[in-house]
Image (cartoon, rainbow, N blue to C red):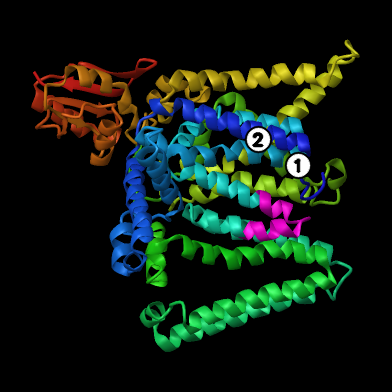
């Protein structure tokens, strides 16, 4: 494996084919997928932001005032704006202006484009590190995981941040050999920050690799080791000066006076120019070590700049509003979650939750190779540390270590008992492409061993003759599971859980996010009285509106509650059982009129007032 290897011409064509295939598949199937609560919030925010861009062209002076910006951008300012900007502008172009797409499809189009990057980048990284066959297995298997395919359909942030995380790691790896990718790494990191706060962990994950690369390439060059220490000295000096500003001004005035033309900004410029200048001098002395540190420098410089520029909400009060945003996620509220018969309401949460949830929601034929591939890599890393055992294994390369660490990084972050545990598997999606690559490695090694044995009897047997049916055998259960559960992706459970019924018996969350209600909307449209009131449990007012404007729910129907509605669709949640009891009391019946049942397991239950 060549560090930072560029893809071949054939690999570029295969990557393009994977992107087109994924984008078309997501676009072709999106109309069946319901609107999650978050998604409708982002639809609304995207429209508000798009209107501001229109005002910016008509009345730039007024649009750039803080009052106009707050009026347009204050809604949902707990999340960065990049994806919502893309959702809103896509809706403005493809629905409002051109009329080519229904509203939901127009909003979701940018999410499809970002989601389609995941198989592409997985293939490129896997091919370069382990071979093209491994890359293809990882790419093709990624979206066969039902919950991952479901998240790829949504105009949300979870799959886009998985794509951006993977893009930053890929750029970092390419930067080991190419200065241009070192610059791009900083740009991509800035875009990742603009996508979701998960990106804040990336520098801490990548920095050890950059420092290790610098250290190992300068073993015999003490003169080259001087420059990294000088960069660290500059960082320390600027940190001390920032500290003095805080002490002299006080925390409140420090935040209030942190504007574009201020000592605060000057210190940042000094740090950026100084660090990049020192790296330039280091490059003249020792290019490999300078290349290793360049991505960290560009991430530190470009990341905050791009984050600030992309979000008009920050322009007039960058520090206060960024501090609020960071504090919101540092103190995020905890949503109740059903796990192995327990309602998890507050920390500490079970340490094993993420691993168990992954095991029960990833098709077993893919999960087992993932675990095997990671354990083999971890075992090689441990054995290579000791003189007695290092000769028994091949020491993992830097690229392999990069894959292995990122395969568990997001999982370990979310596994902390104090971190909110909700949302199914979406919060650790950035780990899944890397686990897919390691699964491909495990499967490929198994196929190679099998071929060696079979060639004793059939000497002319090719590797492809074994790899093709093995790949198909492992991916087929995932494909069947995807088709069986689609479009109710949050309800999927694997063979280890015993499928959907087994998960219900285990006491797992049956579904969440309210999107499964689409299964009963046709019945409601047919049976609801004219101008009737409908209680769609877990569906917020924005989602109710979106179902109507996308032609999925009758326009005359009004949202209601369990006591004042004519029809109620209760989405089964253990923590919300009182809503079903209230419907029984108000409606005078416990007999469902219809519902959504997956493998005879209730998901959505519909009641009609007598």
Residue placed farthest to the top in the image? 457
Residue 58 visible at all: yes
The image position of residue 167, as x and y in percent, is: 62, 48
Residue at 56 percent of width and 27 percent of height:
144
Residues in magenta? 170-186
Q: Residue at the location (71% across, 27% down)?
A: 443
Residue shown at 56%/63% (left/top)? 303
State the separation of the CA atoms marked 1 and 2.
Answer: 12 Å
- Crowdedness near tag 1: few (<14), some (14–19) or many (≥20) residues, C-alpha within 10 Å: some
Q: Looking at the rendered structure, which numbered label has been put on residue 7?
A: 1
- Residue ID for mark 2: 16
Side of 422 relative to 222 (left or right)? left
269 or 96, nearer to the observer: 96
Task: Inspect the magenta stretch and tell me whether residue 337 lies in it.
Answer: no
Q: Looking at the rendered structure, which numbered label has been put on residue 43?
A: none
The image quadrant that residue 536 belongs to is top left
Q: Position of residue 362 (x, y in %)?
A: 53, 30
Residue nearer the viewer, 36 or 511: 36
Asked if marks 1 and 2 touch (Cβ < 8 Å), the reply is no
């Amino acid at each position: 494996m060549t560090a930072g290897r560029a893809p071949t011409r054939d690999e570029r064509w295969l990557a393009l084919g994977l992107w087109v295939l994924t984008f078309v598949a997501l676009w072709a199937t999106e109309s069946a997928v319901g609107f999650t609560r978050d998604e409708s919030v982002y639809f609304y925010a995207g429209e508000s932001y798009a209107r501001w861009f229109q005002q910016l062209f008509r009345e730039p002076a007024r649009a750039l005032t803080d009052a106009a910006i707050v009026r347009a951008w204050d809604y949902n300012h707990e999340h960065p704006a990049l994806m919502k900007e893309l959702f809103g502008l896509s809706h403005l172009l493809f629905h409002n202006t051109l009329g080519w797409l229904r509203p939901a499809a127009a909003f979701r189009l940018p999410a499809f484009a970002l989601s389609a990057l995941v198989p592409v980048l997985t293939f490129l990284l896997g091919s370069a590190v382990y071979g093209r066959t491994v890359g293809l297995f990882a790419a093709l298997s990624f979206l066969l995981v039902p919950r991952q395919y479901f998240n790829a359909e949504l105009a949300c942030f979870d799959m886009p941040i998985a794509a951006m995380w993977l893009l930053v790691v890929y750029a970092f790896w390419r930067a080991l050999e190419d200065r241009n990718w070192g610059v791009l790494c900083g740009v991509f990191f800035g875009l990742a920050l603009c996508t979701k706060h998960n990106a804040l962990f990336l520098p801490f994950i990548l920095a050890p690799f950059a420092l290790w690369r610098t250290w190992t390439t300068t073993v015999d060059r003490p003169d080259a080791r001087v420059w990294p220490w000088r960069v660290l000295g500059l960082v320390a000096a600027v940190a001390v000066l920032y500290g003095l500003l805080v002490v002299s001004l006080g925390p409140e005035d420090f935040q209030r006076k942190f504007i574009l033309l201020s000592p605060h900004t000057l210190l940042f410029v000094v740090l950026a120019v100084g660090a990049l200048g020192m790296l330039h001098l280091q490059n003249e002395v020792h290019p490999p070590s300078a290349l290793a540190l360049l991505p960290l420098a560009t991430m530190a410089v470009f990341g905050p700049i791009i984050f600030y520029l992309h979000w008009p909400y920050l322009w007039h009060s960058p520090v206060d509003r960024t501090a609020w945003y960071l504090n919101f996620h540092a103190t995020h509220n905890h949503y109740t979650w059903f796990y192995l018969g327990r309602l998890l309401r507050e920390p500490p949460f079970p340490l094993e939750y993420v691993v168990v949830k992954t095991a029960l929601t990833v098709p077993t034929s893919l999960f087992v190779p993932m675990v095997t591939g990671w354990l083999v890599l971890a075992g090689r890393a441990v054995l290579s540390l000791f003189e007695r055992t290092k000769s028994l294994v091949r020491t993992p390369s830097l690229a392999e270590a990069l894959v292995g660490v990122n395969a568990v990084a997001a999982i370990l972050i979310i596994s902390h008992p104090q971190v909110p545990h909700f949302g199914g598997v979406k919060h650790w999606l950035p780990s899944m492409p890397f686990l897919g690559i390691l699964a491909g490695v495990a499967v490929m090694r198994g196929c190679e061993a099998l071929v060696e044995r079979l060639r004793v009897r059939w000497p002319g047997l090719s590797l492809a003759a074994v790899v093709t049916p093995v790949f198909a055998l492992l991916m087929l259960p995932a494909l069947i599971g995807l088709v069986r559960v689609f479009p109710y992706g949050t309800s999927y459970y694997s063979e280890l859980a015993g499928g959907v019924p087994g998960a219900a018996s285990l006491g797992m969350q049956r579904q969440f996010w309210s999107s499964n209600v689409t299964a009963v909307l046709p019945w409601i449209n047919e049976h609801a009285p004219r101008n009737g009131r409908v209680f769609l449990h877990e569906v917020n007012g924005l989602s109710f509106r979106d179902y109507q404007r996308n032609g999925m729910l009758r326009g005359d129907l009004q949202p209601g509650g369990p006591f004042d509605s004519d029809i109620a669709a209760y989405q089964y949640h253990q923590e919300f059982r009182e809503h079903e009891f209230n419907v029984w009391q108000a409606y005078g019946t416990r007999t469902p009129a219809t519902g959504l049942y997956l493998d005879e397991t209730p998901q959505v239950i519909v009641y009609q007032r007598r």
